[in-house]
Image (cartoon, grey):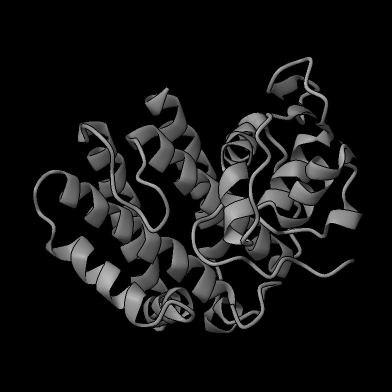
Amino acid sequence: MLEELLADLATESDALRAAVAPLDDAGWRSPTPAQGWDIATQIGHLAWTDEASLAAAAWAKGDPAGWDALVAAALADPAHFVDASAAAVAAAPPAELLARWDAGRTALAAALREADGRLPWFGPPMSPASMATARFMETWAHGLDVYDALGIEPERSDRVRHVCHLGIRTRGFAFAAHGLEAPAEEFRVSLILPSGALFEAGPAEAAQSVTGSAWDFARLVTQRVHRDDTDLVAVGADAERWLTIAQAFAGQPGGGRSRA
């Protein structure tokens, strides 16, 4: 499973790199749908988060200094820590930024293959496979922002199932992040992947459910689309509430996206 995740992550990352590598300096400063983030900031965030993941892997192997420093910085300024970190990395010249991202993601893949046990994170600790899934989710989501800025239609592949899986696994976190008690019962989630295959989770007899396209569900849980602009259908009040607050990424509650 881990090797499949890492292979899909590499494919997603390589496609994004190919889209940004030819850009001139002005292109790197093109605004994206994320307010205040240009293309350089998006790639800077991915590079920085890969490096943070490497620090987490080092912590798990008995070298806590790098991770402890990140946690201290996050606690000192939780509201601006992520944006400031991305902006700092993005200030580098494009060639240097790309080289930093390449080095970090290559090193992280090797570290996750060697990792044993759970890794610390800004949310709950994660297994190496969960960390790889989270890195895929972020790469895919930030890639959507970059492709939008460049007017490129992203490939709709069944790799999106990794984002759907994480979106479902983080249901409880999404409720907690908004100060809400998560529903005790599981929901049935049935999503249609780009190939037409079905992605399903949760008990078939569940009273509440979510159905629709996997692409829209993945965009929703990464807050790349407004709930009302999806084809998702919720049955049950709690399932509908989930779709309004769904968040597959750690940290404070995201602001979501405006309606198209």
Does residue 154 show up? Answer: no
Q: How many marks?
A: 0
- Please tell me in which quadrant of the rendered image residue 155 appears: top right
At 17% from the left and 51% from the top, the residue drawn is 59
Give the left or right position of residue 208, taking residue 106 as reference.
Answer: right
Where is residue 174? Give x, y as percent.
62, 52
Q: In this view, does 216 lie to the left or right of 16?
A: right
Q: In which quarter of the image is the N terminus?
A: top left
Instruction: Please identify the quadrant where the C terminus is shown.
Output: bottom right
Q: Is residue 155 visible?
A: yes
**Position of residue 246 measured from the top left corner of the image (x, y, whole percent):** 69, 51
Residue 198, relative to residue 250: is it above or below?
Answer: above
Tell me where residue 117 appears, x and y as whole percent.
24, 33
67 or 219: which is nearer to us? Answer: 67
Q: In this view, does 2 lie to the left or right of 201?
A: left
Name, please, the residue furthest toward the left. Answer: 62
- For the point 13% across and 57% down, the residue is 64
Q: Residue at x 86, y 43 (%)?
A: 237
Q: Quadrant of residue 197?
A: top right
Q: Where is residue 63 in the image (x, y as percent from the top left)?
A: 9, 54
Q: Is residue 145 above or below residue 130?
A: below
Locate residue 211: give its quadrant: top right
For image coordinates 31% across by 53% down, the residue present is 53
